[in-house]
Image (cartoon, grey):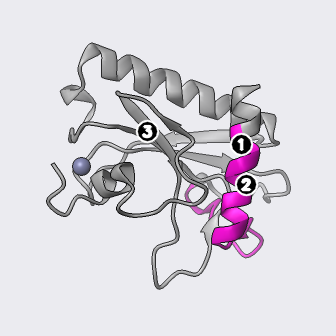
Amino acid sequence: MSESCLVCDEVSGDIPVPGGQLEASDQVAVFHCPIVAPATDVYAGYLFVVPRRHVPGFSGLTEDEAEAVGVAIARWSRVLEAVGAEHVYVLRIGHGVDHLHVHLVPRWPGTPSEVSWLHVDDWDGARRVDTPAAADFVSTLRTVGVA
Ligand SMILES: [Zn+2]
């Protein structure tokens, strides 16, 4: 299924993601959020964990897919913490795109306490990067993730 599904296109590579996929198995894909025009930057470390198959939500996952998604959420949360995230928010929203995608959003040190989780990626001092810097960051995450 890929009749204009943004996530299917990211999983298939039709829409490039910075630095390529961090994890790609039969069941799950993990990648850094790409920059979507008109934006020119993206929040560093903003990852998506998605089932490879087009499934709208958790209730549609097979047991194997659910296990793979859960393990990937744990693994890449650990990696974000290993590179300095003081907290990793895990969100499933799903109003805009009907292909399950779990957001992993790091809270980086130096984020003022008054900045809520909802704005951790867009306050004035948020760690935002362009595509080459996001790709470099993905390389670092990949190195830590396989260690
Ligand atoms: Zn899809």
**Between discs 3 and 2, the one toward the N terminus:** 3
Three-letter code, disc 2: Phe
Circles 3, 2 touching at the beta carbon (< 8 Å): no
Horizontal side of 115 relative to 40 (left or right) equals right
The disc at residue 29 is 3
Mark 1 closeness class: few <14, some 14–19, many ≥20 residues within 10 Å:
many
Q: Nearer the viewer, residue 126 or 29?
A: 29
Three-letter code, disc 3: Ala
Q: Quadrant of the C terminus?
A: top right
* Residue at 32%, 37% in the rendered image: 52
Circles 1, 2 touching at the beta carbon (< 8 Å): yes
Up/down of 67 relative to 29, above or below: above
Q: What residue sits right under mark 2 in the picture?
A: 137
* Residue at 61%, 56% in the rendered image: 19
**Residue 118 figure quarter:** bottom right
Q: Nearer the viewer, residue 143 or 74?
A: 143
Q: What residue sits right under mark 1 in the picture?
A: 141
* Residue 74: percent from left, percent from top: 58, 25
Horizontal side of 3 relative to 147 (left or right) equals left
